[in-house]
Amino acid sequence: MLAMARTFSLIGIDAEPVFAEVDVARGLPSFAIVGLPDTAVRESRERVRAALVNSGFDFPMQRIITNLAPADLPKVGPGFDLAIAAGVLASSGQIPKPFLDTTAFAGELALDGSVRPVPGALAMAEAARRQGHTRIAVAPQDAGEAALVDGVEVVALDHVSKLPPLAEGSIEPVARSAISAAPAPAGPDLCDLKGQPALRRALEIVAAGGHSLLLVGPPGAGKTLAARRLPSIMPALTRSEALEVIRIAGAGGAGGGTKGSARSRPFRAPHHTASGRALIGGGSPPRPGEVTRAHRGVLFLDELGEFRRDAIEALREPLEEGRVTLSRARRSIELPCRFTLVAASNPCPCGHGQGSGACECPPTAVARYEAKLSGALADRIDVFVGVAQPPADAMAGDGGEASADIRPRIEAARKLQRERLGEARCNADMTPTETRKHCRPDPAAEAALRDGHDRLGLSGRGWD
């Protein structure tokens, strides 16, 4: 007898529908899974068998074939266990088949029958809604994330033995989740930055306009301290932005989408040994990289000159387009990556800079160090700030404004930009046409711009 359960395969940050077709027929006892399964999926046979037996069900001693369709879509991970188990029970007559037509499943099974979380619960709930399913059964740890999606009921299934009650309709769906509007927990505050008025002003401009920023200065001048405090003055995520961030975080690991404050912006700081694939994403199946994990937040590259040049150059398209396309033999996926880039670098390998009199680096070493940042990438960075060591009087004094005092100005600027450009867009996203429309300089400013263009050799992108 044939039964078909609905489930999903996570590709990047999106969920693709998969049908678990289970056929139980006469023949020598066997259990086969076909449809491009990876090792974890093939091992589902043993997990499903043990989970059903240990939960008191009768495992069919017949020939069982499970086809995960579409057959040309790679199936990765243990998230198909629950759907396969439901298909086995339905095809052997232990639960009614009709309820499989409206219910989707996503969960890994332990050998005792308990249901474990899987990555991508939010994406799978959205896919279930698009496919017209009325409900989705997930692990309790994933229920809060999945319940953020309107239009589909979410059932927290903690054990495979709850499948018969679920089929009978005696298990109530979880309450609809709401993204918390509470402020993020207190973190690093910008009042810790002392004696750097130009740097503080630059951070405020970057936070308001979503611009990229490069800080150059000696060690200990406050570059890293300032960068790590940038999220504290950025406005809270809107609901649509928060859903994007939760979906990306959830795709990165089971239950990951609801960790931390749902309204706080991501802050990613990869080590300088990170490869281009780690920054951009990749693998088989494709996985999001740091640029996508920093979507709607901050990507901080400390010690920019120590990164591999190919890794740095890979940032060109993400900075320009706000998305990255990962092409593989079987398919291509597009991942969002609208982030605020903050990079920090020393002026030379020793860190002191040739103008300080304490630099010991030969000119060739300085040239190699500076060559890590190509002109093409530098052209995509909006704000450059030289950071000097603050004087002793400034370090001994009190800090400047607190983040809570600065944030209202940032929010007011973002509100004006939304009215001008539309939802989820800011000045850094303006096209050349929009720049000419909204940012007409007065004669004095245009004269200064022309002078800077001639002296600095600005490109067309730099002019806009």
Image (cartoon, grey):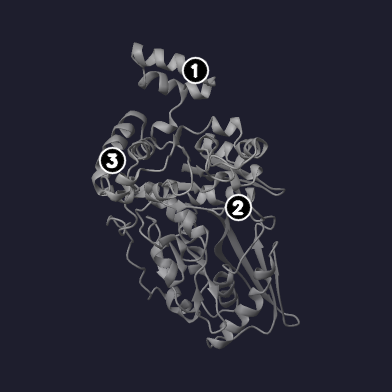
Q: Nearer the viewer, mark 3 or mark 1?
A: 1
Three-letter residue code for mark 3: Glu
Percent across and percent down for residue 123 are 48, 56
Find the distance from the CA under tag 3 to the CA under tag 2. 32 Å
Verify CB contact (< 8 Å) between mark 3 and mark 2: no
Give the mark nearest the N terminus, 3 or 2. 2
Query: Can residue 236 be seen by looking at this rendering?
Result: no
Give the mark nearest the N terminus, 3 or 1. 3
Classify mark 3: helix, strand or loop. helix
Find disc 2 in the rendering and name its residue: 278
User: Position of 367 compared to 161: left or right?
Assistant: right
Q: Residue at x 54, y 29 (%)?
A: 379
User: Position of 395 compared to 104: left or right?
Assistant: left
Give the camera-side residue of 169 and 287: 287
Q: Residues within 10 Å of mark 3 (few under 14, many from 20)?
A: some
Find disc 1 in the rendering and name its residue: 453
